[in-house]
């Protein structure tokens, strides 16, 4: 996020997902009997040698396409006792952009190892599939224990009671919420054997140290299918709007929850695996003193719908009505913000509003779709939006289709197969025009790998503003070419900039692959520095994400450094010197990695942006350009499409330095001072000069 006016917030500890990407290990591919010469083939698999139950990993599949045309398909991953595709599916990725003609592509996909998978030796089998054709490659791995203790006592009452009975006409069964009718009659839903013993509700918090009540436990989200039918003039979702979350249970669930703040909307139905289920809304508390009323959707399936540990399930929430924004603890707006060229987006009576401008950081996604709204639970997304044909309807990932419905509306379908945090999703619907730059090369080198660039600007932009915006769109390739030698290959399957006109919003946000810029009172605009800041986020913050909101320093520190570096190679050092002043200044009070324990401090400019940017620049000066580049690229190699903690970031910086003894201890103290201690740090690059 880049600020054009002050803004504040915070974040904290970890319920982390393990992500591992290893050096490519090429294995002999398995090709089905239907394989024919000249067809695309899986020629290698990269995977962690050990995979822990309940954890997520990145598996890389190398696919060679000898054909003279781009071809589509998908990668399906499974665990097997041999080198053939097995029954335990652990992940997939649709290749919406296809395989390049006469080229080789390494496809990354998230693999989730369910807790129910037994320990022992397996093969990760990754198969490229296209129609009836399949080619597989494999890698030997070992599944190990999760390293967690026992679930603990489910309680003396248990979900079915000691008698398994039925309410007022007899002994009470486990389904009290259904009252006298009891779904299975007087014997109780599980009979006398107590098969549902041990089931319980998932946690209604993700344990983020700043946004205390946000997030949920008991499951891992895999995919969201969001379907919106939106009227920009009324700012309403029509009946038929819904979100379906596919998830895998990480414990035996009798109930689970989602983050959803419907405000003026109505929840029309909640279905678990296609069957309507009871639900309720509860308040959400965010420390130290913010409460969001009715923002926790608790789903209570009937006992015959309870979900066993390791089972994949779907929950669909149908909703409709007026869509409101979320007000942050610092007073700023986020989520489904109305697209208002003047006046307040929070005023339903404002007549100069023409759609939506979705900017979700940190918790605004809950204003327009139900989810596990916590950074570490990344998932894939499909977004389908029906809106007037005068508007552009954006979504997360790549454009799949744009269909004229013949009634003045169009339906836009977008999809991403890269694991994405909910706060980075996109659903802007606004009167916009597409820019002339529609593609970029993601590698920054030859051979080229061209990907879509989705560039749009407000349709009321003046000719001068259009010229300036087209200049910024054209600068995207230069940004990629500058950063790929430092950070590594651009990590997404598309890019772009969305130049909106919502001046009262006051900030830009790095929505994944489609950074959003709110513009000013005079119209849509993008500055060079802000653009470099947001594009840096596509590597740091979006691809390698924060484990909790205490890692906001990681997102914004790297983006600040990237904006400095975009000016010149010497500029980061100049910025470090200019900002290292006045030890008595209050700007040094808040340590970047603590956020002062208050989410209202999260976007304070100096502690969350400048100081961590200085910490990174100081590290570059200490270890040199080569080691700094190695650090940036190793962060991407180890943590891409997953999350990172502050301690993991520090540990890797120490490892890459190759320092030993007193010098290593001094470097560790350097990171402690710059990220975790109040006051102006006294350890600087000059401290390391012999």
Image (tube, rainbow, N blue to C red):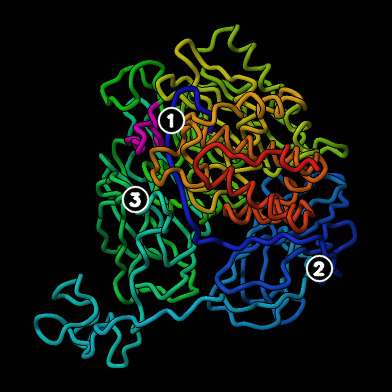
Q: Label 2: which residue?
A: 34
The residue positioned farthest toward the bottom in the image shown: 192
Q: Position of residue 30 (x, y in %)?
A: 82, 71
Does label 3 or label 1 sit earlier along the sequence? 1
User: Is residue 335 a member of the stretch shown in magenta?
Assistant: yes
Residues drawn in magenta: 324-338
Reading the image, the residue beneath label 3 is: 318
CB contact under 8 Å: marks 1 and 2:
no
Classify residue 671 as left or right of residue 629. Answer: left
Estimate the spatial distance between the alpha carbons at disc 3 and disc 1, rounded to whole Å: 33 Å
Q: Is residue 80 left or right of residue 276?
A: right
For the residue pair 500 and 271, the one nearer the viewer reads as 500
Tell me if residue 683 comes above or below residue 482 in the rendering: below
Q: Nearer the viewer, residue 619 or 71?
A: 619
CA gap, disc 3 and disc 2: 43 Å
Q: Residue 7 — which label?
A: 1
Is residue 428 toward the left or the right of residue 370 in the image? Answer: right
Q: Secondary structure at mark 1?
A: loop
Residue at image x 76%, y 61%? Answer: 22
Q: Is residue 616 above or below residue 465?
A: below
Q: Is residue 207 visible?
A: yes
């Amino acid at each position: 996020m880049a600020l054009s006016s002050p803004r504040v917030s915070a974040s904290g500890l970890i319920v982390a997902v393990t992500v591992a990407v290893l050096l490519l290990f090429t294995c002999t591919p398995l090709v089905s009997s239907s394989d024919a010469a000249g067809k695309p083939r899986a020629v290698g698999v990269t995977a962690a040698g050990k995979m822990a139950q309940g954890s997520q990993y990145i598996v890389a599949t190398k696919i060679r396409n000898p054909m003279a045309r781009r071809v589509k398909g998908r990668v399906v991953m499974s665990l097997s006792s041999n080198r053939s595709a097995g029954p335990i599916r652990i992940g997939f990725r649709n290749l919406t952009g296809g395989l390049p003609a006469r080229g080789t592509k390494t496809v990354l996909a998230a693999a989730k190892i369910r807790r129910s998978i037994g320990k022992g030796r397996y093969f990760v089998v990754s198969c490229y599939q296209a129609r009836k054709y399949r080619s597989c490659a494999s890698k030997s791995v070992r599944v190990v224990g999760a390293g967690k203790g026992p679930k603990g006592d489910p309680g003396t009452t248990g979900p079915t009671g000691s008698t398994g009975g039925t309410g007022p006409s007899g002994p009470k069964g486990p389904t009290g919420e259904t009252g006298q009718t009891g779904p299975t009659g007087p014997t109780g839903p599980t009979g006398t054997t107590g098969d549902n013993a041990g089931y319980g509700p998932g946690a209604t918090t993700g344990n983020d140290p700043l946004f205390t009540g946000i997030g949920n436990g008991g499951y891992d989200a895999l995919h969201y299918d969001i379907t919106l039918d939106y009227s920009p003039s009324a700012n309403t979702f029509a009946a038929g709007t819904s979100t379906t979350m596919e998830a895998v249970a990480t414990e035996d669930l009798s109930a689970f929850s989602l983050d959803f703040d419907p405000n003026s909307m109505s929840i029309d139905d909640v279905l678990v695996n296609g069957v309507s289920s009871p639900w309720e809304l509860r308040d959400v508390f965010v420390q130290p003193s913010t409460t969001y009323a009715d923002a926790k959707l608790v789903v209570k399936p009937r006992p015959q719908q309870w979900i066993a540990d390791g089972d994949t399930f779907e929950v669909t929430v149908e909703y409709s009505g007026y869509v409101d924004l979320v007000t942050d603890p610092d007073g700023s707006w986020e989520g489904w913000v109305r697209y208002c060229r003047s006046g307040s987006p929070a005023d339903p009576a404002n007549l100069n509003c023409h759609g939506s401008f979705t900017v979700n950081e940190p918790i605004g996604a809950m204003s327009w779709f139900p989810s596990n709204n916590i950074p570490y639970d990344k998932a894939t997304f499909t977004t389908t939006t029906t809106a007037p044909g005068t508007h552009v309807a954006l979504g997360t990932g790549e454009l799949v289709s744009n269909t004229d419905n013949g009634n003045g509306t169009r339906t836009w379908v977008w999809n991403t197969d890269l694991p994405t945090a909910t706060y980075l999703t996109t659903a802007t619907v606004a009167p916009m025009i597409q820019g002339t730059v529609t593609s970029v090369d993601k590698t920054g080198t030859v051979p080229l790998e061209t990907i879509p660039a989705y560039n749009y600007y407000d349709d009321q932009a003046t000719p001068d503003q259009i010229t300036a915006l087209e200049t910024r769109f054209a600068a995207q390739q230069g940004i990629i070419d500058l950063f790929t030698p430092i950070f590594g290959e651009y990590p997404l399957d598309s890019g772009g900039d969305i130049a909106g006109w919502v001046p009262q919003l006051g900030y830009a946000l790095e929505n994944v692959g489609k950074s959003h810029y709110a513009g000013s009172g005079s119209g849509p605009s993008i500055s060079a520095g802000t653009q470099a800041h947001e594009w840096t986020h596509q590597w740091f913050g979006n691809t390698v994400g924060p484990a909790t909101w205490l890692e906001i320093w990681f997102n914004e520190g790297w983006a600040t450094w990237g904006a400095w570096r975009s000016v010149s190679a010497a500029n980061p050092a100049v910025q470090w010197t200019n900002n290292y002043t006045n030890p008595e200044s209050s700007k040094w009070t808040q340590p970047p990695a603590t956020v002062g324990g208050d989410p209202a401090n999260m976007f304070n400019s100096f502690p969350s942006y400048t100081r961590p940017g200085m910490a990174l620049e100081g590290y570059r000066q200490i270890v040199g350009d080569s080691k700094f580049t190695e650090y940036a690229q190793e962060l991407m190699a180890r943590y891409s499409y997953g999350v990172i903690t502050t301690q993991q970031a520090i540990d890797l910086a120490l490892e890459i330095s190759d320092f030993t003894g007193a010098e290593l201890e001094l470097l560790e103290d350097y990171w402690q001072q710059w990220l975790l201690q109040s006051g102006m740090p006294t350890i600087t690059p000059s401290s390391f000069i012999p």
